[in-house]
Image: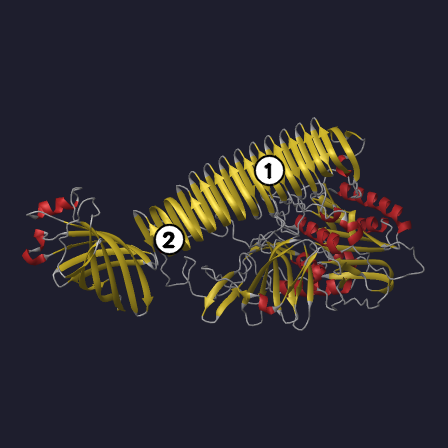
Amino acid sequence: MTVHTKKTGRYTTIRRAVLMGLIGLLWLTAVPAFGQESDSGSASGPIRRFGLFVGTNDGGSSRQELRWAVSDAIKLSRVLSEVGGILPGDGVVLENPGKRNVEQTFTRLSRIIDESSEDSRRVEFVFYYSGHSDETGLLLGDEHFAYQELRENINSVDADVSIAILDSCASGAFTRTKGGVRTQPFLLDDSSSMSGHAFITSSSADELAQESDRIEASFFTHYMVSALRGAADHSGDRKVTLNEAYEYAFNETLSVTSSSLSGPQHPSYNINLSGSGDLVLTDLSNPVSSVVLDEEIAGRVYVKNGRRNIVAEINKPADKILEIALDPGIYHLELSDSSGSAWNHSFNLSYRSQKFLVAGDFYPLEQEQNRSRGGSPSEPFMDEDTEIAQSSEGARAVPAPYDDVTNADGSTSPAPSASDESSGDNSGRPSGEDDFFAVEDDFFTTEEDFFSDKDDFFSETTPSTEAAQPEPDESGNRKEPETGLKTGSKTAGGIEKTPADETVSPRPVTLSYHPFYVSAVPGISYPVMEGRSVQSTFAYSPLILDLGGLAGLASAGIFTTLYENSSGVMSSGIGNVSRRNFTGVQSAGIFNTAEGSITGVQTAGVFNTSMERSSAAQVAGVFNVADEPLSGAQLAGVFNTADHQMNGVQAAGVFNSTGLMNGVQVAGVFNGSRRINGAQLSTVNITEDGAGAQIGVLNIARGEMKGIQLGVINISNDLYGIPIGLFSWVKKGIHDIGWWVENDTHHFLGIANGSRNFYTTLYGGILPVNGVDQLEDLTMGFGWGTRLKFRPLYADLEISIRRGSVGDNANQRLASIFDPENRYTYPSAKAVVGLQFLGMGFYMGVNADLELEPGLTGGYSQYNGPGGGSYEIPGFGTVHNRFTLGFRL
C-alpha cells in the first residue's frame, strides 16, 4: 500500500471511474425533499439540490499522477444522489477536465438553476473537487484555475446555499481568501431557513492532502463519504448535517494522518450562512437500502462490498443504534472491537431492504494461513490486505502498515516501521507448520500459494448473494469500489458523467413511451427524439439503436444499447448492451453485455458477460464471464469464468473457473474453483476446498475435500472420503507400513494409503518354514479398509481379494499368481483393534477367508490358505478364520 500526496504524484496509468446505472424513476417519488418544514416566506415547492463533481488525477507534467481523485468524485456524487437529495439529471461528474470545460459546466448549471428557482423553495448547489492544487488554485493538468476564479464561478451559480468541498493539497488557502478560521461550526436550530455558503477543505493552507491505495481513496473523502452514509449521525435522527459530517471527517482524517511522514492533515472550513436551522446533507429516512447496527455493537466497522473494497468505515460507539445507507448488493462487515478481536458478518441487501444486525450476528473472522506484516493495532484499516495472526487467544486483526510516502518535493520517505505481530516464516504460514504443498521440491514448487487471493485467476469466494460489480476501464487498470459509478452516459441517481472534451447538458430521467421507435443511428429517428429518453415496445434500427427502456423487442443490424431496467428480447448483428437490469433474451452475432443483472438467456457467437448477480443461461461460441454470482448455466466452446460464485452448470471445451461452485463443472482440459459443492469432471480438476466428487485423470484438492476423488492420480491436503486411483496421496491421511502374522505361521507385509478414514491396502505373505526365498504358500492381496479412531485406540475393518500360489519352487509359485487359470482366488476380511503409541500401532484381531462355491474365477475355488478354524455355510462356501497379531508404522 502506498500513500501519495495530492500536490505531487505521478502514475503512468489513469484509472477511469466506472458508472453504475440510474436508480430510476422511483427517485422522482421516493427521494424525500430535504427540509420540508413550512416557510411562509418562500416558494411552496421543495428544496432542490444540484451538484458538480470534478475529479482530476493529472496535475501536470511536473507532478505525479494520482490514482483515486476521479473515483473520489464519483463516490461523493453517488452518495449525494442516493441520500443527498440530488435528483436524476441535477448532477454532473467531470473526469480529468480542462479549465474551459469546468467553466462551461458552471455556465450551463447556472442557467438551469435560474430556470428552476421559481419552482423551488430553496436551491442548493454542491461543488466538489478532488485532485492537485497549490496555494493559489486548482491544477487541472497543465492548466491553473485560480481560487479567485473558482469563487467567482461558484457565485455565478445563483443558488440560495452553495457548498464547496475541496480535497487537494493546500486547499485551505481557498477558505483563507475570505478569512476562514479552523473552528467548530454551530448550526443548531431545528428549522431550515438559511442562505449563504459553506466551504470545506481537506487540508490547511500549508498541508498536503493524502490518498491511500489501501482504501482506494483520499483519506478525507473516504471519511466524508462514510459520514454521509450515516457514520456521522450522532443525534440518531437519521439525518447527517453539515456540522456532523465535518466533525466526523475532521476527526478521522486527523487521527489517521497524525503519524504520517507527510504530516497531519487538518480539514478546515469557512461558513457564512444566514438564517436558522441545520444544513442537512443526507437524509437516511428513505435510503435505497441500509444496514442498521444495534447499540450493543461497538468498535471500528469496515463495510466492504463483494470485491472487498471498503465502502464505509465507521467508528461505532456503544449504546447507540446507527444506520448506514448502502447500495443493493453483497456486503461484508468486519468489526474490530476494543480487545483487538476481529469479527465478520456477510449478507445481501436487496433493493429498498434493511438489514438489522446485533452483536450475535458476527462470528470470528476466518483464519488465514498468511504471514503477519505488523503495523500499529490502532491503524483504522482492515481490507483485503489485512492479515490474520493466529494466537492462543483467537483471531486478531493485524493491519498492514502504510508503504512509502511521496512528498511534495518528489522525494520518497519510508513508511514507519512496525514489529511483526506473530512469528512466521516466509512461506506465509505459522512457523513450524509442515505443508506438503509449500515445500520447494514438492508438486507445487514455490512458496506462494497456488490459490493466491490476489494473483490467482480464481476469484475469492463470496456468499451466494448479489453485488453491484465494478469494472476496469479500457486500459484494464481501474477497479472502482461498488459505490463507484459504472461506465456509461448516466450515473446512479441520474448524475451525468461527461468526458473532459464534451459539453455538459444535464437532462431529466423521465422516459417518454412510444410503442414503435425506428432509428437509423442515434439522433436520426422517428419519432424525432433522443432514443435514451424513449420507452418502447418495438424498436428497430438497421445500424445502431440507443433506447432508454424496453418492454418488448429491440432489434438492430449492428448494435443495441438499453439504458434503463428493461424486459423482452434484444437482437443485434454484432452486440447488445444493457446498462441496467434486464429480463429476457439477449442474442447477438458477437457479444452480449449486461452491466446490471440479467434474468433469462444470453446467446452470442463469441462471448457473454454479466456484471451483477444474475439468474441466466450464458451460451457462447468462445467464452462466458460472470463478474458476480450467477445462477443457471455457462456453456462455451472454449472457457467459462464466474469470478465469485456459480450455481448450476459450467460446461466448456477447454476450461472452467469460478470462486464458489454449487453444481457441476465439465471441461475438456481443466476445471478450477475456490470451493466445489458438487462435481468436477475433466482431465485435470483443482479446487481449494470441496464437498462432492472430483473425477478425472488428475484431481487436486488444495485444502479440505469431503467426498470422492476418482482418477489416475489423486492429491489432497485433507480428505474426508475415498480416494480411488492408481496413485493417491492425502497429506493428512493414512500412510502405513505394516507387518502381521496369522496363526503364528504365515507372515505378511503390506502398505496402506488413503484419507483420514478410508484407505487402500496392498500386501503379500509367505510361510517362511523352509526359508523366505522359497516363497512357500505365497499369497498376494489388494483391498480397501476403513479406520475408526478412539484415541489412543483405533479399529481397522478391511475387505480384500487374495490370490494364492501353486508350484514346486519359488519361480512356479510366483508365476502362478499372475496365471489367469489359477483358481486360488478368494475374498478375505480382517477386523482388528489397536493401540497407537509412539507413532506405531500395535493390534490384534481376526482374519477370515471365504472359500466360495463356485469361486471368483468361475470354477470351484480351491483354498490353500493358512490353516485355522473353519466352518461351512451351506450353499455358499466355507469360512476359514485365523487369529492375527501385528504392528504398523
Q: Which residue is mark 2?
A: 716
User: Helix or strand or loop: what does disc 2 sit on?
Assistant: strand
- Say whether disc 2 or disc 1 marks the residue closer to the N-terminus: 1
Does 511 sit left or right of 542 as displayed? right
Which quadrant would the N terminus be assigned to in this image? bottom right
Q: What is the x, y in percent for residue 526?
A: 79, 29
Q: What is the x, y in percent for residue 515?
A: 77, 34
- Circle 2 residues within 10 Å: few <14, some 14–19, many ≥20: many
Amino acid at pointer 1: Gln
Q: Which residue is mark 1?
A: 602
Q: What is the x, y in percent for residue 56?
A: 69, 47
Residue positioned 69% across, 40% down in the render = 567
Task: Tell which of 628 and 425 is nearer to you.
Answer: 628
Occupied quadrant, residue 589: top right
Occupied quadrant, residue 189: bottom right
Does 135 sit left or right of 673 as displayed? right
- Circle 1 residues within 10 Å: few <14, some 14–19, many ≥20: many
Amino acid at pointer 2: Ser
Residue 55 visible in rendering: yes
User: Helix or strand or loop: what does disc 1 sit on?
Assistant: strand
- Is 430 placed above or below 328 here? below
